[in-house]
Image (cartoon, rainbow, N blue to C red):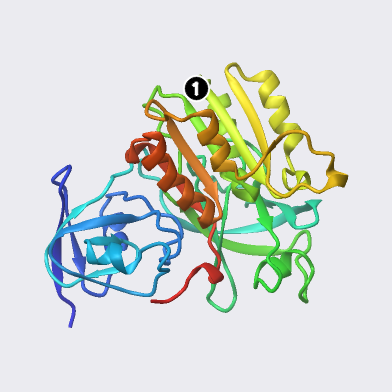
Amino acid sequence: MRVSYQVTLKASGKQFTVQNDETLLEAALQQGITLPYGCKNGACGSCKGKILEGQVEHGQHSTSALSPADEEAGGTLFCCAHPKSDLLIEAREVQGNSDIAIRKVPCRVNSIAIPNKDVAILTLQLPAAERFQFLAGQYLEFLLKDGQRRAYSIANAPGQDGPLELHIRHLPGGLFTDFVFGAAEPALKEKDILRFEGPLGSFFLQEASPKPIIFVAAGTGFAPIKSIIEQMQLKKIQRPIQLYWGGRRPSDLYRDALCQSWAQAIPDFQYIPVISEALPEDTWTGRTGFVHQAVMADHPDLAAFQVYACGAPVMVNAARQDFSSQCHLPEEEFYADSFTSAADLATN
């Protein structure tokens, strides 16, 4: 039997109704309240909040996103929490997503480029009459034939003529990435037709803030950050920017030349590449180590900054924890998008 419960956000006093067979995130988004979210499957932790009054039941989720101790203390993942009573919750609302509709859209593969051995840059041509609106930093989900979905961030800025651009990292054995990289038959090829749903996600620039920005990207986490930076250029948003991009080896920084060009062309823009596992033949002379630790070394006090971090959950979660606990970054000034896979979702 379906039962309705009322959810109240402590900070704003806003309320929404949720059915017991819905998650809190689904109900909030449907009723125009944008809570932070990323993967929507309990793996990334972007939607983490707190239950102050009432009870929820959690579905499948990663214990790295919500540990038993977190849950015991009232922590919750809104993307997999079902209500058992009326609720009072502590959650950050995301401003600026306007009323862009989420839609299912057909597209044609325009091009497939391979800038290094495990990254593909895919461009998608939309129908001639299609105007696909999104915010820089958001993502789309491909709708696969067996009902499964795969999510990828949009790498170009909104409002530009031409195809959508995606950066896809090859995960051997991956249902969609093997298809893209020709490791499964039939392989994806130019002019193939795909379908996606979007735009999705709460990772986008908070334009009202004047604070300096630190972007932290790992691997293809560069894609949504590229979209945001290009949008800032188009809209002539001038704020101090530092881009830290991390990879294991220099070849992982597959658009390094573009970043170098930004550093030359954009006022008050710095680009800091960071490599963690350089080999002697790489002749790497730049920064080494983990990318979020490079940020901490340069900025022991992040109190005056906004941080936008994107990449694997291990990097995003470490940055979230360490920037807050050691570098005084306000929790509400950390914006993140974790690139999760099925392997990131460990059941309780």
The residue drawn where x is 60% and y is 16% is: 267
**Between residues 116 and 229, which one lies in front from this camera angle?**
116
Q: Position of residue 28 (x, y in %)?
A: 27, 56
User: Which residue bears the numbered disc 1?
Assistant: 237
Q: Position of residue 272 (x, y in %)?
A: 64, 31
**Between residues 249 and 162, which one lies in front from this camera angle?**
249
Q: Position of residue 207 (x, y in %)?
A: 41, 29
Residue 212 vs 117, above or below: the answer is above
Quarter of the rendering containing residue 192: bottom right
Quarter of the rendering containing residue 119: bottom right
Q: Residue placed farthest to the right in the image?
A: 281
Quarter of the rendering containing residue 57: bottom left
Residue 169 vs 95, above or below: the answer is below
Across the whole image, how many numbered discs are drawn on residues? 1
Taking 75 as reference, is 53 left or right? left
Taking 133 as reference, is 276 left or right? right
Residue 184 vs 162, above or below: the answer is below
The answer to whether residue 158 shows anywhere in this view is no
The answer to whether residue 303 shows anywhere in this view is yes
Residue type at the position of mark 1? Ile
Residue 100 vs 118, above or below: the answer is above
